[in-house]
Image (cartoon, rainbow, N blue to C red):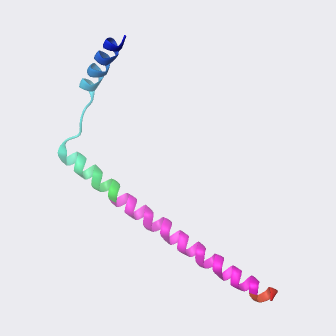
Amino acid sequence: MANGFLKGIKSELKKVVWPTKNQLINNTLLVVVLVVILSAVVLSFDLILELIDSSLWNFISSKIG
């Protein structure tokens, strides 16, 4: 059972089309750039929402007392 399983894995790995070195580098750089951009977007939303939240709490506390 295990022997046939390992042979199946080996035959499936032979069918895989592995990326070239240039493709791998380009895809890695693309992923890193997208992660940095999306992190900046999330950070900006967080800062904007934090500013709105603190402004609302300051407004509410000034009206209450």
Task: Look at 59% across and 75% down and name the residue there.
Answer: 50
Q: Is residue 58 above or below residue 1?
A: below
* Residue 10 in the image, given as x and y percentages of width and height: 26, 21
Q: Quadrant of residue 54?
A: bottom right
Taking the magenta stretch, the answer to whether it contains residue 57 is yes
Task: Look at 63% across and 77% down and name the residue there.
Answer: 52
Residue reaching furthest to the front: 2
Query: Is 26 left or right of 63, judged from the image as shown?
Result: left
Q: Is residue 34 above or below residue 18?
A: below
Q: Quadrant of residue 8?
A: top left
Query: Is 56 left or right of 16, judged from the image as shown?
Result: right
Q: Which residues are magenta?
A: 33-61
* Residue 2 in the image, given as x and y percentages of width and height: 35, 14
Q: Is residue 3 above or below residue 54?
A: above
Q: Is residue 61 above or below residue 50?
A: below
* Residue 43 in the image, given as x and y percentages of width and height: 49, 69
- Please tell me whether the stretch drawn in magenta is mainly helix, strand or loop: helix
What is the quadrant of the C terminus in the image? bottom right
Query: Is 21 left or right of 28, judged from the image as shown?
Result: left
Q: Quadrant of residue 4?
A: top left
Task: Look at 31% across and 21% down and name the residue there.
Answer: 9
Decide which of 36, 61 is in the foreground and name it: 61
Decide which of 53, 23 is in the foreground and name it: 53
Taking the magenta stretch, the answer to whether it contains residue 41 is yes
